[in-house]
Image (cartoon, coloured by chain):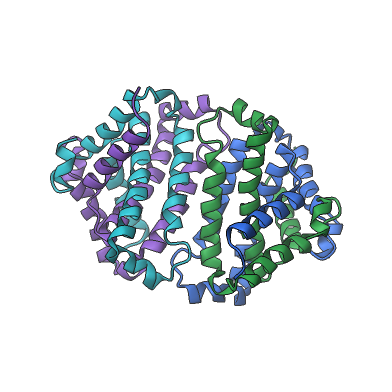
Chain colours: A purple, B cyan, C green, D blue
Amino acid sequence: MTSSDHGDDVTPVRALREMVEQFVAERNWHSFHNPKNLAMSLGIETGELMEHFQWLTLEEAAAVQNDPERKHEVGEELADCLAYILAIANVMDFDLSSTLAAKMRRNAEKYPAD
Amino acid sequence: MTSSDHGDDVTPVRALREMVEQFVAERNWHSFHNPKNLAMSLGIETGELMEHFQWLTLEEAAAVQNDPERKHEVGEELADCLAYILAIANVMDFDLSSTLAAKMRRNAEKYPAD
Amino acid sequence: MTSSDHGDDVTPVRALREMVEQFVAERNWHSFHNPKNLAMSLGIETGELMEHFQWLTLEEAAAVQNDPERKHEVGEELADCLAYILAIANVMDFDLSSTLAAKMRRNAEKYPAD
Amino acid sequence: MTSSDHGDDVTPVRALREMVEQFVAERNWHSFHNPKNLAMSLGIETGELMEHFQWLTLEEAAAVQNDPERKHEVGEELADCLAYILAIANVMDFDLSSTLAAKMRRNAEKYPAD
């Protein structure tokens, strides 16, 4: 996991995918990593992420990043969400970089910038 | 978006984040990109992702990747989910690579491999 | 569906459950009504409900009920969410009234009033 | 809460709504019960419901109702989901019985029986 510790500027998406792949392989969890289960898992983790903002005003939500402890907790949930997206990419064999680029181009057609 | 078109092996996470950041900036949508709204948005997109697997058996769900059209549709929803995770990282200033690495280490303590 | 048209004051919960049960039976959809699929379905419909509030401030969200057209749309999503809860109760054989009463008593212990 | 303890056959939907309303009122939580917060809360509780089925096959999911302890746990999450639907109906002033009946009629047009 060395490369990923060097941050988003230098870490290729592949390194994040491999982090998740290695975790799954070491536990023999491949049989559970069905796309249906993983989509559901993303829903569950997103629920845990939303829990941190459930009763906050938008102002309070924007201020969470200034509270190191709460920011850390949100980061943990965000990481779990990301891990399931990477797991889906691994199991269904998506290239996330090109899939995202293609979708952003479609979104740009749907919502033209001025 | 050139670099991201070269795939996960060579695309740094930062390039994906910038793709989303540029999209938001060009539309002046920063005021909407509150963490509460974005967490909710991830929940909405995850719902659209789950919709593709809603009534499928696990066997059918595993076979979706062999159907190019359906795989493409799933990829579009997965990309939207990823975009909101990147948007949350942008607005709350998370380094996703190190946040994920730290969380995977914690998950490894919680679920030791054998 | 006559009784249910008389409103919440006089409609027993059973009548709502039967509305959903009849709909499922007439379409021979019982084989799809597995609790895992139905929990996922509730997640999907909740996403559609959240979509109406995604970018709104809390003030704007509170005002939606004063806009008949938008209120109607929210009602349609809320009804779909309720339908899946009733479907889960039907398939797993829960009495919703006593299950809710028991849970509210537990919640009251967890969050004592004053 | 007496009437609700008599089960779905005799409990009017209004009694369930009042159970939730009383709980909210006794804790002075009305200011938090904004439709945006409540829709998000339904998403969170649905995540907890899905957690019980996350890694199960459809056969295993169908068998949960035969395991009293697990069935009880699912019931608690289902009750929390229902409570938030009732809370949204309370705060936005929906009649759930007629809203559901109207939506089921629309669904029947969309998906005709045979």
Residue B106 seen in the figure? no
A23 over C70 or under it: above or below:
below
- In the picture, measured across the screen, residue A98 lies left or right of residue B51, that is left
Q: Residue at x 47, y 53 (%)?
A: A44
Q: Residue at x 77, y 64 (%)?
A: C14
Q: Residue at x 33, y 64 (%)?
A: B64
- In the picture, measured across the screen, residue C5 lies left or right of residue B36, that is right
Where's the N terminus of chain C, which quadrant?
A: bottom right
Residue nearest the viewer, comparing D105 with A16: D105
- In the picture, measured across the screen, residue B9 lies left or right of residue C11, that is left
Q: Where is residue C68 shown, x and y percent of the image?
A: 69, 34
Residue C75 picture quarter: top right
Q: How many marks?
A: 0
Where's the C terminus of chain C, which quadrant?
A: top right
D19 over C70 or under it: above or below:
below
B26 over D44 or under it: above or below:
above
Residue B96 picture quarter: top left
Q: Where is residue C66 shown, x and y percent of the image?
A: 70, 30
Residue C100 seen in the figure? yes
Q: Where is residue C110 shown, x and y percent of the image?
A: 67, 49
Residue D71 picture quarter: bottom right
Q: Where is residue A48 shown, x and y percent of the image?
A: 48, 47
Q: Residue at x 79, y 56 (%)?
A: C4
- In the picture, measured across the screen, residue A58 lies left or right of residue C80, that is left
